[in-house]
Amino acid sequence: MSRLLIKHARVIDPSQRLDEGLDILVVDGRVARLAERIEERDAQLIDAAGLVAAPGFIDVHVHLREPGFEYKETVATGAAAALAGGFTAVCCMPNTSPVNDTAAVTEFIRARAAEAGKARVYPIGAVSKGLAGEELAEMGEMVRAGAVAVSDDGRPVANGYLMRRAMEYSLLFGIPVVDHCEDTALAAGGVMHEGAVATRLGLKGIPAAAEDVMVARDVILAELTGARVHIAHVSTRQALDCVRQAKARGLQVSCEATPHHLALSDAAVAETSFDTNVKMNPPLRSAEHVQALLDGVLDGTVDCLATDHAPHHADEKALEFDLAPFGVIGLETAIPVTYDLLVRRHRLPLSRFVALWSTNPARLFSLPGGTLKVGSVADITLLDTEARLTVNPERFLSKARNTPFAGQRLRGWPAVAILGGEVAWRRERR
Amino acid sequence: MSVAASRLRGKDLVGIDPLTPGEIQLILDTADEMAKIAERPIKKVPALRGKTVVNLFLEPSTRTRFSFEVAEKRLSADSLSFSSSGTSVEKGETLLDTARNLEAMQPDFIVIRHRHAGAPHQLAKVLKASVVNAGDGAHEHPTQALLDAMTIRRRRGRLEGLVVAIVGDLQHSRVVRSNVMLLHRMGATVRVAGPPSLVPVGMEALGCEVYHRMEDAIAGADVVMMLRIQLERQGKMNFPTVREYYDFFALTPERLRLAKRDCLVMHPGPMNRGVEIDSRVADGPQSVILEQVTNGVAVRMAVLYLLAGGNGEPTAD
């Protein structure tokens, strides 16, 4: 029997409304006991004095690029980056090549993740075959193979009829339908948020309305179908209002916010003088929307945080702003960026922070973890809320370096990631 | 009235946006001096002797490229021009590759025209050479705005207090952005007008008043500047037809009468006669369109000269 004893941690587990100094005993990969003082002779010891112990953080929105784009990232490097960012589980989007629209690809990704032995990887299957937005992919087969949700992320499900049918069909499996909400006709080839900054820079804008109208449609379809609908990377005031109203009406609509949409605004495109590492979709919004998103996190409209980790090769980003691909990585910066912003600066209670990164995503996507209840899987993140470090992309375990946060000094970093009762990653002392 | 700066702060001229009023005035004052060179029998000074200028025109352009080439020759620089309508990526290389290849030839200046906004800025960050923006996408065209300002100033003696109306496709125009920023910074009142479907969001934040009806914008104006309708950049959803555009937004003799009697008529060229401007106006007594072209050479000489570190009398050697 393998035993792990975590001593002197401040245990924060929103699933049990727990926030107190406790020891945690893990036996055979499961939480065995939580108590003020546990003595255990044959256990591996971790002194967590000064650290927060939380149920392992979960990122429900990453792109691992395998199969097909291994030069950007692989399941193994992405899962390693996840652990180094404090995440014990991630959900990966299906826009690979081939697209994850069959059980075979779902199985392949799971096999790759098992070989890597890093963070747990839960594939998200495609809504439509080939992400083409025309025919439903084999949702049931993919769910059977381990898919936890469906999405055409990277693009919206533009066809309202297809979306309606996908939502209805998802009821058979009780999985959420995740939508990248964008009316591409309205987005019209834009490359940043439409507003005064884009106008000054002469860049084509993506109006907030492109997101708003699609979120509104999805909420209406959620009501029609009764499906679980999760809005990916919500970034606008009106989209949030729409989700807020949906919740008030009792619909099963949830949404996520990314660290970059919370921490940065469209001003960054001007400030960095067209740095393509601030180009992503949805784009960084104006201050008004950033404030609305922050309010949405603080008032609970935003259910969870997620990175939309989108690795690209440096050569792909070293292009004109118009031509560089959308997307930034986030796994290895998400926790300090959001801790520093939400907990330290905006006084979000730490238990809410843990809920946003663990309890809620586990519940929304019906994943193991998200709790430290006795008997649950021992995926645990130890967080050093006092650590103050500078983001150094050279040290990333991800293959990619396309972060907008390079050089930022941030407080609140993951210290140890425990996966099924084993220490899977530990921050090196420098 | 601002006081002219003694020199430019940056190594590059990527736009009007980074310039102070003092720097703008310095360039305009220097350009006035440079204009005198063209009046001499030998139109050449040795100010940039031994300096290499690469004119990198990655978007079709004739007059701006020629204007830079003339300016470079009058300053005795060694210049070479490269024209292509492709982007880096179409050639399979990155913008960074392009930059490094150019740098390897050790030029002192890179004058760049690029289809995409921000390309000169991205290059300027990594190159040791001085980068001069000769137009980037729908972003900036700083030497155009400077030559426009020079033309107005030479005719009216000042910029401050003037009312300048700019009319046309505001969405796709780099000329309007640079002009609004420059004229606003120098104390002019700038009005812009165009079909509402071609007015970018937040335009007024650049320092202008936005009108939809052209007549309202040009009423009582000291200067009317017409923008080229970039027919090749229009989708079919921005305005109905060229015919209807002429009905509502062309500068005709009748409309020009709404402006001040001595109002200047300007156009950055090339003109679409009969689309945004009526030939009777383009060729009429109030038109300074060809002066703009002449002044373009002087402004570009001034910019290159100042970026090379010049600050004294350009004609002395």
Image: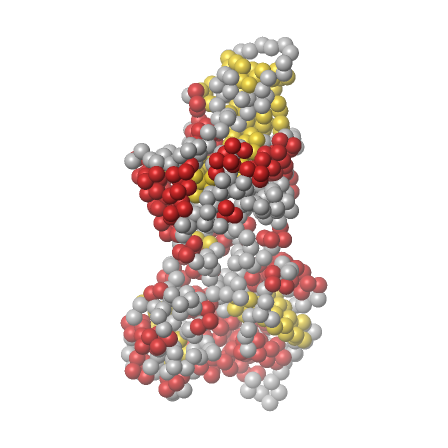
Q: Position of residue A44 (x, y in %)?
A: 64, 17
Quarter of the image where one finds residue B58: bottom right
Residue at image location 40% in from the left, 75% down from the top: B226
Residue A218 visible in the shown view:
yes
Residue appearing at x 36%, y 49% in the figure? A213
Q: Nearer the viewer, residue A153 or A134?
A: A134
Q: Nearer the viewer, residue A255 or A112?
A: A112
Colour setup of the view: secondary structure
Which quarter of the rendering shows the C terminus of chain A?
top right
Q: Is residue A47 above or below residue B98?
A: above
User: Residue placed farthest to the bottom in the image?
Assistant: B41
At x 36% / y 69%, what residue is drawn? B239
Residue at image location 44% in from the left, 32% down from the top: A173
Residue A384: x percent and y percent?
A: 55, 28
User: How far across and down, in percent of the image, does residue A117 sit?
Assistant: 63, 30
Q: Quadrant of the N terminus of chain A?
A: top right
Task: Please say if A307 is above or below A156.
Answer: above
Q: Is residue A104 above or below residue B111?
A: above
Left or right: A402 in relation to B189: right
Q: Is residue B3 visible?
A: no
Q: Locate residue A211, reporting x and y percent.
A: 40, 49
Q: Number of marks in the image?
A: 0
Residue A38 lies, with reference to residue A153, above or below; the image says above
The quadrant where residue B218 appears:
bottom left
Give the camera-side residue of A62 and B305: A62
